[in-house]
Amino acid sequence: MGDENQIVAATPPRPGVPLLVRWALLVLAIVSLVLAVIGLLLPVVPTVPFVLVAAWAAAKSSPRLAAWLEGHPRLGPLILNWRNGGVVRRSAKWTATVLMAMSGTSMLMVFEPIWPAYPVIGVMAIVLVWLWWRPEQAPPTA
């Protein structure tokens, strides 16, 4: 295992990527970051998937933004863990579980009629099953 505070340098954008594509990816990265921030404030909006999309798009379009994301004290470890085998910490799994349970419960109490909440809760349940199957530690290196 390496040092958890180690920062991996962002890969520069591919030399053959057209300028328009790089700009589109940069816009996607910024929009994803904005949605991630909104997700911090609204429990129904996910945060982590938007952070991961932002990191992916930034790595392909803006080395500076990618390096900032990877070096961020909160976001960096999450991004690096995901890149290193799709790792999701147990604390993150529990946080997601609690927040999804709260969201589902609030939908059941607020929605009238109640039936639109059922498919949303079903999707959240599927996501939670998938999330709990993710590894909690990086695979051993040879």
Image (tube, rainbow, N blue to C red):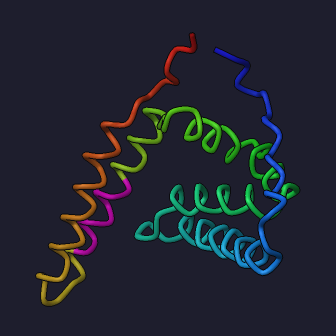
Q: Looking at the image, which residue is at 37% across and 36% down?
A: 134
Q: Is residue 81 left or right of residue 7?
A: left
Q: Is residue 132 left or right of residue 141?
A: left
The image quarter in which residue 121 lies: bottom left
Q: Which secondary structure dominates the residues rendered in magenta?
A: helix
Q: Is residue 22 left or right of residue 78?
A: right
Q: Looking at the image, which residue is at 43% across and 46% down?
A: 95
Q: Looking at the image, which residue is at 66% across and 74% down?
A: 28
Q: Looking at the image, which residue is at 75% across and 52% down?
A: 69
Q: Please tell me whether residue 66 belongs to the stretch shown in magenta.
A: no
Find the magenta span and give its range.
Answer: 99-107
Specify the farthest residue to the right.
Answer: 64
Residue 3 lies, with reference to residue 108, above or below; the image says above
Residue 26 lies, with reference to residue 85, above or below; the image says below
The image quarter in which residue 73 lies: top right
Residue 3 position, x and y percent, is 73, 19
Q: Please tell me whether residue 105 belongs to the stretch shown in magenta.
A: yes
Asked whether 97 or 127 is in front, the reply is: 127
Residue 84 lies, with reference to residue 142, above or below; the image says below
